[in-house]
Amino acid sequence: MYRAAALYAYAIACFFCVSAVSAQELPEDRSSAVIFSYSRIGEDYAPETNLRTDQFLAQIDELSGGGYHVLSLPSLIDALDRGEILPPHSVVITFDGGYRSILEQAVPVLEARKLPFTIFFSSDMADNGDTDYLEWADLAKLSRNPLVTLGLHPAQYVRLSGFGDTEILKQLNRGKVAYRNHLDKEPLYFAYPFGEYDGRYKDLVKTNGFRAALTQQSGSAYGGSDFYALPRFTMTAAYGDIPHFRFVSTSLPLPASNITPGVTDTGEELPLIGFNVSKPLEEELPKLSCFVSGQSRPEIEVLGETRVEVRLSSPVRFERTRVNCTLPATSVDDEGSDEMNDIRARWLGFLLTPPRGESNAEDPTDLQTP
């Protein structure tokens, strides 16, 4: 977690070194939004997944203070699917894990400000009576709130990348059946626990009726995003301060194609990272910066006119290694420049996991965290 915080601080510092020159505006900028991923609120004993209550209140004050447009997740997906123009500085609030502190600490604040939000939960946790998690009665009440969208994790909050179809489908189907039985609705939105997925896992989520799936890779969602690997910025105490929040909340997409790897779980210690940027960004590529958590800065090579390859300095060892690439960006506001616009950046993020031993593929409950 602290390595990630240092990564963000270093990225922001280096970004300001090159951000004085305005960058190319793109059509994608007008149809994009930042999605936030929160987990625990005010549970300071678990700092890796927690945002302090004072930090959360400060962030909601920032969102409520003008200049931001908080959208529901369904309305964002509708707009991206139709290619609609979104208001400047559009954001979406989501919560992972289904923790009770969401209900106790976050929901009253968001209701008072009339801000929409989405809560993702695992059905097994709602079943087991653990007072740290939301129960079905809580979820049923929330489902009747027009500000709330409920989405699913697998039935257990576990890593499923690398598992066979049978286990993945069992987890997806059990969660869907419980959701349907208790809430009398069909779940349409999914979030990968820990943000981790592989190609087969993503395909099975897509073919099982979900409209979109969310990761924890940094970046801004836009119409050209993979709807089953939508990026989100993770909010925890280590980088929950307002300057960082402003920096990421006003980020813009770095439109890319032919992205390698297209998953978080590659099974490789030194995965090949590469992507093609859209043609209008060709002249901006000398300003591209990439940063890797826990490693020195990677080598960046531009091949041809628009192909970028990022070579890690050492193998992926940490449980979740972040690779973030950024470009300076200009405002797309008709009203002109303001303080938020002055620090805007394009983001393309990768979340990489190290190869897992064969023993990890036997029982997904071995990978569950409390």
Image (tube, rainbow, N blue to C red):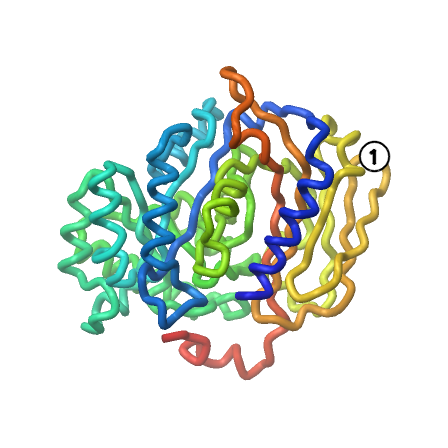
Judged left or right of residue 58, residue 286 is: right
Provide residue 235's location: percent of width, then percent of height.
44, 54
Q: The residue under label 1 is which amino acid type?
A: Glu
Judged left or right of residue 56, residue 270 is: right
Name the element at disc 1: loop
Q: Residue at x 33, y 35 (%)?
A: 64
In the rendered image, the quadrant that contains the C terminus is bottom left
From where the camera sits, is residue 75 visible? Answer: no
Q: Nearer the viewer, residue 313 or 79?
A: 313
Q: Residue at x 36, y 46 (%)?
A: 58
Q: Nearer the viewer, residue 61 or 308?
A: 61
The residue most toward the right is 304
Judged left or right of residue 332, residue 260 is: right
The answer to which quarter of the image holds residue 44 is bottom left
Q: Relative to residue 32, is residue 55 depicted above or below? A: below
Q: Residue at x 83, y 43 (%)?
A: 302
Provide residue 186's location: percent of width, then percent of height.
26, 48
Provide residue 304's location: percent of width, then percent of height.
86, 38
From where the camera sits, is residue 44 visible? Answer: yes
Q: Relative to residue 248, is residue 75 depicted above or below? A: above
Provide residue 246's location: percent of width, then percent of height.
49, 40
The residue most toward the bottom is 359
Q: How many marks?
A: 1
The answer to which quarter of the image holds residue 344 is top right
Give the residue pinned by disc 1: 305
Q: Residue at x 34, y 54 (%)?
A: 54
Binning the other alpha carbons within 10 Å of mark 1 as few (below 14), some (14 to 19) or many (20 upward) gives some
